[in-house]
Amino acid sequence: MTTAKEVRTRFAPSPTGYLHVGSARTALYSYLYARKHKGIFILRIEDTDLERSTQESVQAILDGMEWLGLNYDEGPFYQTHRFDRYKAVAQELLAQKKAYKCYCSKERLEELRNQQMANKAKPRYDGLCRKFMNLSEKSPAENTPFVIRFLNPDDGEVIFDDAVHGKTVFRNNELDDLIIIRSDGSPTYNFTVVVDDWEMKITHVIRGDDHLNNTPRQINILKALGADIPVYAHIPMILGSDGKKLSKRDGTTVSVMQYKEEGYLPHALLNYLVRLGWSHGDQEIFTLQEMESLFNLDHINKAAASFNTSKLIWLNQHFIKTDALSDTAREFGWHLSKLGIDLSTGPLLTDIIDIQKERAKTLKEMAERSVFFYRDIQPPEALIQKHITENIKPAIKDLHGELEKLDDFSDEPIHAILNSIAEKHGLKLGDLAQPVRVILTGGTVSPPLQSTIRVLGKIPVIQKLSKFV
């Protein structure tokens, strides 16, 4: 009896920039497919572009994955640590006459390309150096620089069933003999990807459809190595809100970590990204556990998706309102710390979130509106002149006295005191509430006043009111 092969997926970013939303969605889909099938999710850093790859970008990728909660089972593996292995595999292909040394100069290749373009032909290598595979041909001198090219089949077709696009066909005569080892000995992208996918036993390659044209070349190399061919799923691009390529205006070309800076919850971003190209009926809101159990490749759309920041904000608000307070507190505390708040003082984070969550779109916004819980914010003189008038001060003095005597410092008794004092002084509740709000918060906007007073705490409230009594 045979058993199904273990599902193994990989996310393989190039560390030449930050982890953007398009890459994050690719990582998410690869992660979810592995989790759905109880498989293995691998992180591989494709850092062979030595000029553009940076350690800063590597760290940004690792930080982004950690913040999003996309925990990998193996890795991170770095391609720059595997150069010897790539060279060894290239030598094996040379020995089996499945690759050959190419001595063509850059000048010859440039001239060839110009001629082909002038003839409106597809630019491709003409295979001149294949003749040196024949021992009867004399090869150039040993010190002549060379690259190693893969011997691509001349005829036939590469046919594969893409999990998103369906049956996909490329003719071999449209593909040239691509370089797998450069003249400086470094391996090229298409070659390293193949060797890694082969040796890491990747069963499903989920990546952007901008890689679709690389796939036939990679399949031919895999066949030459006698390797199994993985299932390919090329997912559509993410476009800007205007239907064009993503731009800074859409907020989507910045690092994923910028969304943390702006106060988004990681699972709100994940929930938004999973629906950019995949659906499960009409369901809009998913927990990560639901994503893991429901995700499949069959329901990925072929068409490109458009990034809509308003929808992301809506999701973020939903999760701020509905998440467990203790879960939100971890991210919320980070934002307060960014504002220089000492979290060892002041109210419990969960109490603040509980009374702020209905109005906040982001945690950054919530943190900025919550500074008064930790600091004595002096109201601007204009607000004092407008709201703390002589006729209101007797009511504030009575409020100070009544709150000082109050033992049950909860919403209902506080609200009752506010009402009774307003009535005593012939005021509407709002006429009393706004001056008190200005005194306590330094501004004119806060959660319901009785809740604000409760969470601030009896001693801080009495101290703040006493300054105006």
Image: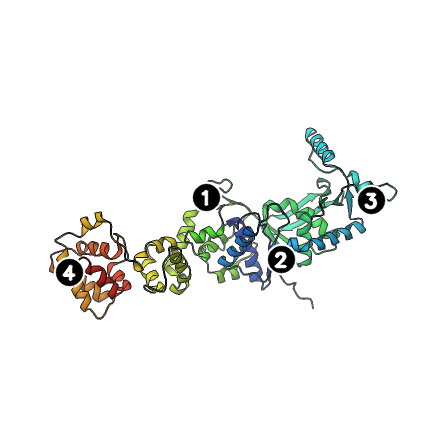
Amino acid tagged 1? Asp
Q: Which residue is mark 4?
A: 397
Camera-near label (2 vs 1) is: 2
Report, in whole angstroms, how far the alpha carbon at label 3 lies from the one at label 2. 35 Å
Frontmost of labels 4 and 1 is 4
User: Does residue 178 lie above or below 259 as drawn?
Assistant: above
N-terminal of the pair, mark 4 or mark 2, is: 2
Splitting the image into 4 quarters, where does residue 466 fall? Answer: bottom left
User: Is residue 101 in view?
Assistant: yes
Residue depth check, mark 4 versus mark 2: number of the one nearer the observer: 4
- What is the x, y in percent for residue 188? 68, 47
Label 1: few (<14), some (14–19) or many (≥20) C-alpha neighbours in 10 Å: some
* Disc 4, SS: helix
Q: For the N terminus, give its image quadrant.
A: bottom right
Circle 3 Cα neighbour tier, 10 Å, few/some/many (<14 / 14–19 / ≥20): some
Alpha carbons under labels 4 and 3: distance apart: 99 Å
Q: Amino acid at mark 2?
A: Phe
Depth check, front residue: 309 or 105: 105
Q: Are marks 2 and 1 in contact (CB under 8 Å)?
A: no
Residue topped by disc 1 = 250
Q: Which mark is drawn over residue 133?
A: 3
Left or right? Give the position of 339 relative to 185.
left
Q: Check disc 2 and report the residue beneath it.
A: 77
Q: CA distance from mark 2 to mark 1?
A: 32 Å
The C terminus lies in quadrant: bottom left
Tell which circle, 3 or 2, labels the residue nearer the N-terminal end: 2
Is 107 displayed left or right of 134 in the figure?
Answer: left
